[in-house]
Each structure stands twice: as C-alpha cells, then as structure tokens.
Image (tube, helix red, strand yellow):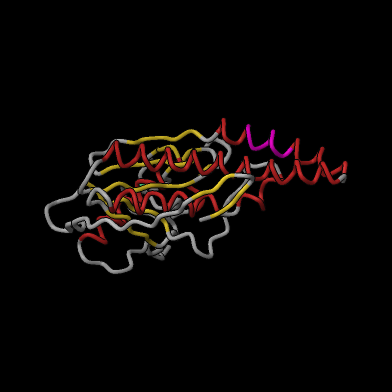
Amino acid sequence: MVHNRGKWFLHIGITKEVPDFEQQGNPQIVGIDRGLRFLATAFDSKGETLFFDGKKILHKRKKFLEIRRQLQSKGTTSAKRKLNQLAQRENRWMTDINHRIAKTLVVAYGSHTLFVLEDLTNVTFNTDDLPKALRNSHRSWSFFQLESFLTYKAQAIQSKVVKVDPAFTSQRCPKCGLVEKANRHHETHEYRCKQCQYRCNDDRLGAMNIEMLGQDWLSGVKHPKIKKLTTAG
Ligand SMILES: [Zn+2]
C-alpha cells in the first residue's frame, strides 16, 4: 500500500501461467530498429515494413525542454516544484507512448512471432537528429522501457523477444552482404550499395538486418552477429 498526494494505491503482483514461445513451427520474424527519427521501424519475414514516426515526439520534447529552461533560470522554490512535476509529466507521457508502440506491435504481428531487437547495452546512440541539450537526456531509458514492455506483452501471447549484436546492422547490404560504412548517407537517410547498387531507406535497412539475425538465432546460432569480411583489393 502506497500513500501519494492524498491518495492510497494498492499494488498487487500477479503471476499468470502462459505457454512458452514455440521455436519450431515456423514463427514469423520481425526485426525492430529503434531510433529517434522513427521510434521504431519493424521489418517482417514477409518483407513488409511498419514505421513509427518520431517527429511529433521530438517536437514535444523540445517544448518540454524550453519550459524546463525557463523554470531553471527562475530558481525559486515554486519553480523547482514545477520542474519536478514537469519531469513526472514527461516521463508519464513517454511511458504511455512506449506502451502504445509495444501494444501496436503485438497486435499487428500476433502470437508465434519472434521479435528481434538490438542489444543496446553499452551502445552510444547516434543522436545527430537531436538538439544538443536533448542528446544526453535521451540516452536510453526510453529504448529500454520499450524493450521491457514488448518483452512481457510478447510473452503473454506466446511470442518472444530476442536480442542480437548491433554491430554493422546499419552498414550491411541485405542483397549482396557487403558491409560498408560509406554506403550510408546520413543527409538523405538513404543506403546505397556501391557493389550491387541496392537502395533503401536507412531505418528500414537496420530493421532488415536485425530480422536476418533473427533468422540466424532461429536456426540455432546462439549469438547472431554480422561479420565484416575483409576483401582483398
Ligand atoms: Zn549490395
């Protein structure tokens, strides 16, 4: 039982027995790339892509930042209280968004789906799209929250989340396998393979490679990883 702002909250833990994900039986594989321009990009084994636009979110976060700055410059006790409330509101809002993305994903793909995410522990995010002041604050908690929401929502419907090595997922050509950093053009958000001329949106490309690593996992590779082959000449 918790008391907060004149209200009592009763927290009850529940456990529910659900059947496990079946690795056999040809489950659907969905690679999910997490980012800022798109909060999530999902690519499935049928070749379909789902984009979760992040622009509005980014816009609202900039607004939050503006108010925060104004309050910080005041420095009064009441400004500090308001800052605290603002932080809580922003967290609740972001939490709600992550809940909704996770829910949309499990509803869209249903049971017997293998959701594949990058293991972002120890990863520094590419935050080029963010204003400077937001770069550090973003670092991660929101990405990890989405991961945990998706993990328990997937489990409840006999689906599963696996994590794979994030190395080179934005550099590998899904058609010819060439791993090349220069194929990615940040300004145009495009991937262009200089070996086979394959072209693709760079967020979608990440999701495609993550999906491929999911296929490896399903075929028995314990820690799927893209290897950068060094070619002579
Ligand atoms: Zn290629």
The image shows residue 163 at horizontal and vertical percentages of 37, 60
Q: Is 152 rendered above or below residue 233?
A: above
Which residue is outermost to the bottom?
222
Residue at point 69%, 37% (across, down)? 64
Classify residue 111 by image quadrant: top left
Q: Is 108 rendered above or below residue 75?
A: above
Q: Is residue 59 left or right of residue 189?
A: right
Residue at point 41%, 45% (across, down)? 193
Q: Is residue 159 left or right of residue 130?
A: left
Q: Is residue 89 left or right of residue 39?
A: right
User: Magenta stretch mostly in which secondary structure?
Assistant: helix
- In terms of depth relative to the viewer, which is nearer, 196 or 109? 109
Q: How many numbered markers are drawn?
A: 0
The image shows residue 134 at horizontal and vertical percentages of 68, 45
- In terms of depth relative to the viewer, which is nearer, 205 or 221? 221
- In terms of depth relative to the viewer, which is nearer, 183 or 81? 81
Magenta stretch encompasses residue 4 = no
Q: Which residues are magenta?
A: 60-65
Q: Is residue 16 left or right of residue 77?
A: left
Magenta stretch encompasses residue 61 = yes
The image shows residue 107 at horizontal and vertical percentages of 29, 37
The image shows residue 117 at horizontal and vertical percentages of 38, 54
Q: Quadrant of the C terminus?
A: bottom left
Q: Is 116 rendered above or below residue 93?
A: below
Residue at point 72%, 39% (across, down)? 65
